[in-house]
């Protein structure tokens, strides 16, 4: 998926708004990512019975405070590309997550 993060950052209409749990990689650690996002970025993610929903507070969604944390939550496998464009706070959160999981 090389380049997908950059594509989504240039066209907010392509950002997935609802993602089924079954389509999230590293689902066993999604709750950990969810709580990190909620703690540092507020209520930008809605939790449903079988999915998560992107609920940005800004229109268009703000890159560092909404889009990148959301993309990391639903696509942790994109971490390398997200790290290339993330601000220092999200970089630290992702690195801490990776170190906690020994990945």
Image (cartoon, rainbow, N blue to C red):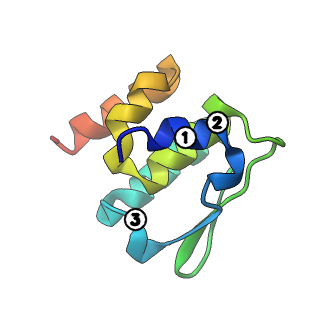
- Of the residues tagged 1 and 3, which is closer to the observer? 1
Pointer 3 residue = 24
For the residues bearing labels 1 and 3, Cβ distance under 8 angstroms: no
Residue 7's label in the rendered image is: 1
Residue 36 position in % (x across, y down): 49, 43
For the residues bearing labels 2 and 1, Cβ distance under 8 angstroms: yes
Give the distance between the C-alpha atoms of the residues marked 2 and 3, in whole angstroms.
Answer: 22 Å
Question: Is residue 39 visible to us here?
Answer: no
Residue 10's label in the rendered image is: 2
Q: Secondary structure at mark 3?
A: loop
Give the distance between the C-alpha atoms of the residues marked 2 and 1, in whole angstroms.
Answer: 5 Å
Considering only vertical position in the picture, is 10 above or below 16?
above
Q: Secondary structure at mark 2?
A: helix
Query: Which of the two discs, 2 and 3, labels the residue nearer the N terminus?
Result: 2
Residue 81 position in % (x across, y down): 38, 33
Judge from the rendering whether residue 10 lies leftward or rightward of residue 24; answer left or right: right
């Amino acid at each position: 998926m090389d380049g997908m993060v950059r594509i989504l950052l240039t066209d907010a209409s392509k950002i997935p708004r609802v993602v089924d749990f079954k389509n999230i990689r590293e689902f066993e650690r999604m709750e950990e990512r969810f709580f990190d996002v909620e703690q540092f970025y507020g209520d930008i993610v809605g939790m449903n019975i079988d999915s998560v929903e992107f609920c940005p507070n800004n229109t268009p969604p703000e890159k560092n405070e909404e889009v990148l944390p959301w993309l990391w939550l639903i696509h942790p496998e994109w971490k390398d590309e997200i790290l290339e464009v993330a601000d220092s706070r999200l970089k630290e959160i992702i690195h801490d997550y990776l170190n906690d999981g020994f990945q």
